[in-house]
Each structure stands twice: as C-alpha cells, then as structure tokens.
Amino acid sequence: MGLELYLDLLSQPCRSIYIFARTNNIPFEFKHVELFKDSVLGKKPAAASGAERPRTGPCLSCAEDPTSGCSTPGPSNSEGDGKISLLKKVPVLKDGDFTLAECTAILLYLSRKYNTPDHWYPSDIKKRAQVDEYLSWHHANIRANAPKTMWIKVLIPLFTGQPQPSEKLQEVMEGLSTSLKQFEERFLQDKAFIIGSEISLADLVAIVELMQPVGVGCDIFEDRPRLMEWRRRVEEAVGKELFFQAHEMILNIKELSNIQIDPQLKEHLAPVLMKMLK
Amino acid sequence: MSGRCVQPPTAELRVPVGEHRTEEFRKVNVLMKVPALRDGSFTLAESVAILMYLTRKFKTPDHWYPSDLQKQARVDEYLSWQQAHIRGKGSKLFVTKMLIPILTGQPLPPEKVEGATEELNVVLSQFEEKFLQDKPFIVGNDISLADLVALVELMQPVAAGYNLFEERPKLAEWRRRVEEAVGKQLFQEAHEEILNAKNVSADKIAPELREHFKQQLLKQVN
C-alpha cells in the first residue's frame, strides 16, 4: 500500500495538494472523497479510518471553516470521540501507517519525502522564511474570506433553500478586497511570483484559494491586472491542463445544486450554517 | 532542557502600545504587526515563520523542529491546526473577557464570554485527545516548537482570568514540563506583562488608536 491522498477537489487545500503531487509526478492513490455527497447522504464510510458507522451531528469546529474539512490528525486516526466531521476529513495523507492532516503539513511532507525541485520550498533560509510567512498569513487573511463566497452563493442556499442577503456577500468581498490589496503590496509586489522568479508553495496555496470565488461568479481577477498576470504565470508553471483539471469541479459548481440532500440533515444543519456567517 | 541554551545576540525592541502603527515601524513590517524580525535588510513577520527562521539560522537543537520527516510533519500539522483552533479561540476569549472591557470601559454581555469559553473548551478537548494524548510533549519525548506555541497561546485566556489548567490535570502536567524545558524563570519573565494585563488602563493608549483597536476587536468577536 503506497501513498494515499484523500481529497475532494471542491476544497481548496485539496487542490493545492493534488496539483503539487501531480506536477511533481509523485505516485499516489487518489482517494476521492465527495464531501457533499458522501457526508450529506451518510452513505460512504470515513475516508481515513475505514469505520462504517453513520455520522450524527455536525462538528462545530468545522462549521467555522467547513471547506478545510475537519481532519483528525495524530497518529491514531480513530473516530472514537463520536463527534464526527460533517464534512469528512480532507485533505488527509496516508503513507503506510502514517496519517497526516493539514494542508501545509502535507505539502511540506511531500516536498521533503519526494525531493521536489528546490523552488517549491527553497533551501535558502530567507526564501524559505518568505514561503512560511505567506503560508501563515494566508490562513488568517485570504482564507478567512475567500471560502465564504462559496458558502454564501451556493452551499448555504443549497442547505437552507434560501438565497443569502447581498449585504453578507458585500461584507465578505470587502474583506477579501483588503486581503488582496495586502497580498499585492506585501507579498507579490512587482515580482513574477511571491518569492521571486520561480513558483513556490506560497503561490500554489494562494491561487487555489482565489479560484473559489471565481467558481461561484465573483471574479476577483477581473479588475486586478497584476493578479491576473500572476495567475497566468502560475497556471503555466504547474501546467495549464493540470490546473484546469483540478479546477473543473469548482468551475462547474452550479451542478452541486442538483444534489439531493437528506431533509433531516438539511434541517439539522441550517442553523449551524447560519451561525457560521455571523 | 537538553542541549545548551542558545543566546543569539539580540537588541531589545520594546514596542509601546500603539507604536507598531507608526511610520518607523512600518519599515520593519509593512503590515504593521508584531512580532516582526529584522535581520540586516531582511524583514519577516508571522510568528511561525520567525520561529522556523531562527531554528534554521541559529541551528537550534534538533528537538525544536526535528529533522525526522514524520516528527517534523507532526510539528507542521500542529502549527497549522492551532491557528484557527487554540490560537483562534484562546485569543477570542482573551479579547472578549479582558481586552474589549479595558478599551471600552465595560464588560461584554455574559453570554458572549460564555460562548467564547465554550468554544475554547471544545478545542482544548481536541488538543488533549488528538495532539497531546498520553505523550509528555506533542511530538514525543521532547519539547518542540509545537509545545512552545501551544502554551504561550493558552496563557492568553489564563491571563484573562480563565484558569483552564485547573480542571485539566493532563494539561497542567504538560504545562509544567514545558515550563521546565524552557526554564521556569524565563517563562515567568516572558509572561509577566500578560499576567498583569488587567492592570493596563485605557488611558495608556492614544485616543484615536483606542477607537481603532476597539472597532477591530469588536468585529473579531462578532
């Protein structure tokens, strides 16, 4: 049993891992987890533990940022706590009996184990620090708002049956705008990529997050030529075909509205989701 | 603690309240936040990035950020998870219970504090069950960056008056071990200010900054 990656390409962290592994020809078994189909219908077993019990109750900590997937990290990936992620566990890496969660940790593990080209996570300590700095800042900034666009425009209406008021989206877009400004001023500046002339993990993590609003119709690249240029460079660097393949699902997100959701689950989740947006 | 205590030459930069928003400081960190590192013309923000830079530049003992692939991954995993969880909820409680009342002169409604406390309790359980488990430290037998970052974050809600170690003996034991590993005196010294935070009064902060902080923090907890 070789390397297994449990991923749902609707999720941004999953896309960065998928693209990274594929572009570096890292051999892995793609364990496709369909967050909304499987969790929602409660049919498939948990991705990483193999337990077959159906789930009950959402995991509140996941409600904070459901698209991150509630990973169960640590050496034993058991689900004995009974309080299971509504959204399964993605991304998760399994390498023999070693299980790992958290996108950054997985990307770094892959870059080290498979000795990927230096530019992804440079050995030069200053350049490396710049990647670390971006990855850290990204969490609290870009990732604070970009995912919400999908929740507001697609997922919450799907679960609650009602569209969201435009002020909510407005607020999120404003927050995202502020982050994008900082992204351009502090991180990208006039460089080709975040740390200079070559792509690194920082660019990859950034781009997949920014494709989320694009997928739901909020094209944040439209009025930002510098960002648009950077995006084009990133796509080329990883390979256009791979990039689009990884983003196919999110770019066709409207199809998600055709999913049947268990009405009981809908009822259960609606208040949790509404709370999330407060 | 095993290994010698590295004392790299450093200048002390004390940043009085609000000074991180001045033009001078902007040169150190354009995002105007602390912590910030400047090493010659190289500037760096984000505590995790700074910690990792320091371990590499000063070649600190291996246990801080192990070279073993899997152990290193566990440290990375914790440092990533903690942002939205231990750090997120610990800060939220600190802000809700202590900082906003200092800035506004009045406490927030009790439900807000209770809510923030509950959220922290949830992540504390996750921390114990998934990260610490029955090990002496998060990544095995030695202290690492994960433990250091975890404990300093947990001291925030403690400073706000929530003694989260009181009914969690496993956590209290771990705390004791971490304090010993870094050195009790150093640990106390580092926490002196925050543990006396309740003595900070709003008039130490310039009025316009006070308003700015207030708005930011209120947004954060709502």
Image: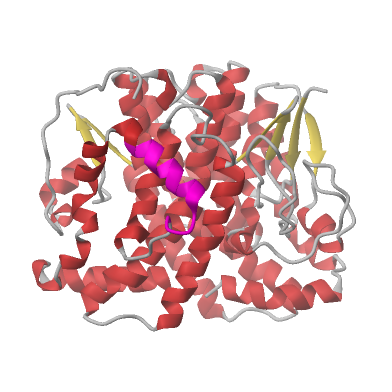
Q: Quick one: B152 or B51, which is closer to the camera?
A: B152
Q: Residue at x 64, y 58 (%)?
A: A66
Q: Quick one: B216 or B128, which is closer to the camera?
A: B128
**How far across and down, in percent of the image, does residue A244 sit?**
70, 41
Q: Residue at x 21, y 38 (%)?
A: B185
**How far across and down, in percent of the image, does residue B184 sit?**
26, 38
Q: Splitting the image into 4 quarters, where does residue A50 fall? A: top right
Q: Quick one: A137 or A223, which is closer to the camera?
A: A137
The dominant secondary structure in magenta is helix
Residue B159 magenta: no
Q: Residue at x 10, y 72 (%)?
A: B203
Q: How many numbered marks, from 0 up?
A: 0
**How far across and down, in percent of the image, does residue A175 sit?**
43, 64
The residue range painted magenta reads: B165-179
Q: Splitting the image into 4 quarters, where does residue B163 fall? A: bottom left
Tell me the colour scheme of the image.
secondary structure
**How far across and down, in percent of the image, does residue A90 sit?**
69, 46
Residue A55, placed above or below residue A75: below
Residue B170 magenta: yes
Position of the N terminus of chain A, as image quadrant, is: top right
Drawn side of residue B221 relative to residue B118, left or right = left
Q: Residue at x 54, y 56 (%)?
A: B123
Residue B214, placed above or below residue B79: below
